[in-house]
Every structure is written in C-alpha cells, then in structure tokens.
Image (cartoon, rainbow, N blue to C red):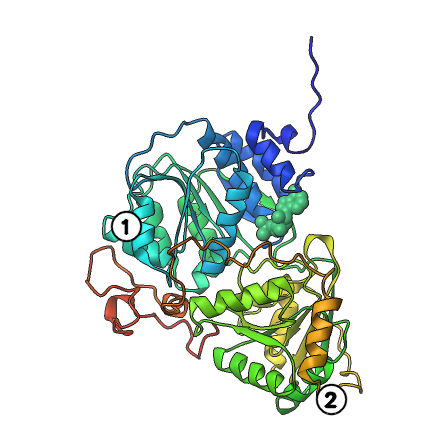
Amino acid sequence: MENIETSGFAALGITGVLLKATENAGMTEPKPIQQQSIPAQIEGRDILGIAQTGSGKTAAFSLPILSKIIGLGDKRKGKTARALILAPTRELAVQIEETIRTLSKGSHVSTALILGGVSRLSQIKKMQPGVDVLIATPGRLTDLVRENCVDLSDTRWLVLDEADRMLDMGFINDVKRIAKATRKDRQTALFSATMPQEIASLATSLLRDPVRVEVAPQGTAAAEITQVVHPVVTKEKKRVLSGMLTDPSMASVIVFTRTKHGADAVTRNLERDGFVVAAIHGNKSQNARQRALNGFKDGSVRILVATDIAARGIDVVGISHVVNYDLPDEPESYVHRIGRTGRNGASGAAITLYDPGAENAKLKAVERVIRMKLPMKDAPAAMGPVPVGPSTERAESSSDRSDHRNRSKSGQRPGQKAGQKFGQRSGGERREGRSEAIWTNDGAGRDNQSAPQNKKPFRRKSRGGGSRAA
Ligand code: AMP
C-alpha cells in the first residue's frame, strides 16, 4: 500500500498545477489563515475571516476556488463569471488579479478585472465569452450588471474582501445587490479586518453556517511593529516630519494624512525640502495613482503620502516606517495604516504625530481599538528643519533601499493590458461617497468624468460629515 506523506499546501488539498504554481510563487508553507480556511472551503463551507491584508488571505480564498474551477472545464456562458471577488479599491482589485494569475499559471483559468477609472469597453469585451474569475470593485460592476453587460446568475463563488472598507466607502448597498444577483446556492467568503455591527449583520445575511477564522484578535496590530507617539502641535508637524525623514534608516516610508487636501500640503512641503515623494489619494487620476505606487514599489520614490482609502490593500514589501501625520477619524484605520509595515514577518515602525490639544479623543479611540496604551515620547531633538538636497535624497534612495523591498518586475503597471487606458479620471472618491445606487439605468454613465457629480441616486448619504479622506 502506498503511503504518500503530504505537507505544505498539498496537505490542505491543493494539487496538480495549482500546487506547482503556488510553490513557484514562493509559497511552500501555508500561513495560519490558509491552514484554517482552505480545507473548509474545499469542503464547500462558507468562511467568515477576520484578517488584514498581509495575512495571506488572497491565496486563502483563491486557491480553493481555483481548484474547483479547474475541475469544471472551460465551457462558460457568455457574460457570466463563475467566481466573483469584490474589493473596495482599484489597487486592491489589481493586486488580487495578479495573485490569482500567478497562482493559476499553467491552468486554463481566465480572469477579468472590472473597475472604475479605466475604459469600460475593454471590460465589456472581456466579459463577452464569460470568465472563470471576475475581480471587481462594486461601483463599476453595479453599472455593468445594470446594463446587462455582466450576468451574475451563474456565479457560484463569491468573495467579499475587506468588507469593512466597502462599508466605509458607502458600497454596502451595491454589495448586497450584487450578492443577490448571484446563485442562491453559492459558496461565500467574507473577509474583514474589523467586525463592526453592520459587517456582522451583512455576514449573517450572506453566509450560511460559516467557519469563522481569525488570524489576529480583532483590531490588534501585528506584533512586529514598534509603535510610538510623538506629541507635536499641528503647526509644527511639517517641520518635525521633514527633520525626521533625514534619518536614512527611514528607507521606505508611507505618510498617512486624514484628508486629500492634507496629503497635497504635506507632499508639497516635503518636495520643497528636497525629498523624492509621491502622493496617492482619491483626487488623483488612476494613472497618477498607479505611477506613484509603481515608483514606491520599485524604490525610485522613498516617501509615499497617502490617505486611508487610497492606501487600502497596498501590498508593498519592505516598508520600513509608517508615519501617521495625523490621527484617523476612524480608529480602525490606525490598524490598517500601521499594517502596511511589518509585513511577512519583517520588522517595522509606526510613528504617530499627535497634537495633544486637538487629537486627544482620536488617540483614546485608537488605544481602545488596539487595546493598548501607545508609548508617548518627545520627538527627537534632531528633528529640526534640515533641508535635504534632491541629489542626496535620490542617491540614497536608490542604493540604501535595494534590499528593503522587491523591485517591480517590469515597467508595466500591474494589471494593465495593451490598449487599456489609464487616467481618464479618478472615480474612486465618487464611489466612496455613494450609497444609493440602483440597477435601473439612469443614463448618467457614472464612470463618465463629465457626468453630474450630484446626480441624486448616486449621492452619498452623510456618514457623519466632514471631508473624507480618499
Ligand atoms: P495578502 O494578505 O493576500 O495580501 O498576502 C500578503 C503577502 O504574503 C503577499 O505578498 C503574498 O505573496 C504573501 N504570501 C501569502 N501566502 C504566503 C505563503 N504561504 N508563503 C509565503 N508568502 C505568502
């Protein structure tokens, strides 16, 4: 009798080309979320996953779906998708598609991306023969389903990734409507970094007897990240930030700001002080966002200034520091922000600039969510206004950082295909503000930059007001 010992992903039920592609991608030992959820999904169970980006959740939900799809053969109905993965942001959707393509290399699994800010025509064409796995942001998908360009009636696997963020961005009604359009007997997985009441209710309505997997206690930050808070009055923050960034050990830094306006102001200030910096937020075109991200990934840009929503799902290896230029409005965002560093077991540091006069309640809220008191330290005295010349900055950025992160493999933007247009408009922020979408065609063409911004059915229901970060 043959006794074949299995380990790694094989022990979880992953076989054949998938196993090979997974190992070729450098994934030999499953991460905890993968160990906990892959066998259950292969058995056909629904999953409720509490996990952050960086935990390995993409492979955790993709591998079981891919393994089932491979067994189905390649006959598909036009415009349909066998599996649908919904993600809150375009950047995350692009990243998920890249992962799925890597993991399914050597198989005949087809994928498509549907997201705002790029040509819809190529997306409609791609859907015409039907696809195996569709990765989409809820806004554009809502449009294309409504216009009968996508048919979800044959979709038997549904994944909601970063569900809490979809809620924050006002996508929840779109998500419910999309889920309703899929097969009743579908298998569903819902992943969320946090579990507010609304997400718990959504999970109850969409999942059937789910297996609950949790890789880090809700709202806690990864242990490898050193956290510190520097009390700094708001008007001093720019100066302190520039001084801080003269430290060469801050090799690859994301600076988070609460608002788009704030991101622009911080970026201008850092540029003035001679730093090589790029910004990513909802008022930037898709083209500019992708360019900024690519520069940050390949190391040509050392500092990325980002708002919370635009930074969601950014998976850049080797980010040494996260700086919270200000505290977020939603305390959960702190966990997401600092989770950009300390990935894959690497160490990282999170520094928060905190104005005691203005941000006390926000700091307390963060500490409640992470269930710990953050260490408070004066900003180092060296943090003075030390201007750094652009040439110094550039020289340092290209040499010091080469071992800090994976450089991008090609100059091509992730997910960009020949003929795909980028940068027509930045649609994410408008999506973020919408909660009233309807299936029926109102003819407004929501992806058209010139469409009226305040057309009633798509206007945002206020969630407490204020200028939202994007
Ligand atoms: P995710 O949480 O899906 O964004 O994954 C975060 C990172 O972990 C990605 O860069 C993956 O390629 C990597 N990763 C996922 N699973 C594994 C694994 N089992 N072994 C090594 N790296 C992994």
Residue at the image point whose x is 49% and y is 72% from the top = 281
Q: Which numbered disc, 1 or 2, marks the residue that appears first in the sequence?
A: 1
Which part of the image, by quadrant, shows the N terminus? top right
For disc 1, the neighbor class at 10 Å (few under 14, some 14 to 19, many from 20) is some
Ligand 1: does it lie within 8 Å of the C-beta at label 2? no
Residue 125 at what x, y percent from top left? 30, 48
Q: Amino acid at mark 1?
A: Val
Q: Residue visible at 50% across and 78% down?
A: 259
Residue 145, label in figure:
1
Tell whether circle 1 marks a residue whose Cβ is less than 8 angstroms from ligand 1. no
Q: Amino acid at mark 2?
A: Val
Residue at 51% across, 57% down: 412
Q: Quadrant of residue 121?
A: bottom left
Q: Is residue 139 left or right of residue 57?
A: left
> Which label lies toward us, 1 or 2?
2
Q: Is residue 45 visible?
A: no
The residue labelled by disc 2 is 386
Q: Which mark is residue 424?
A: none
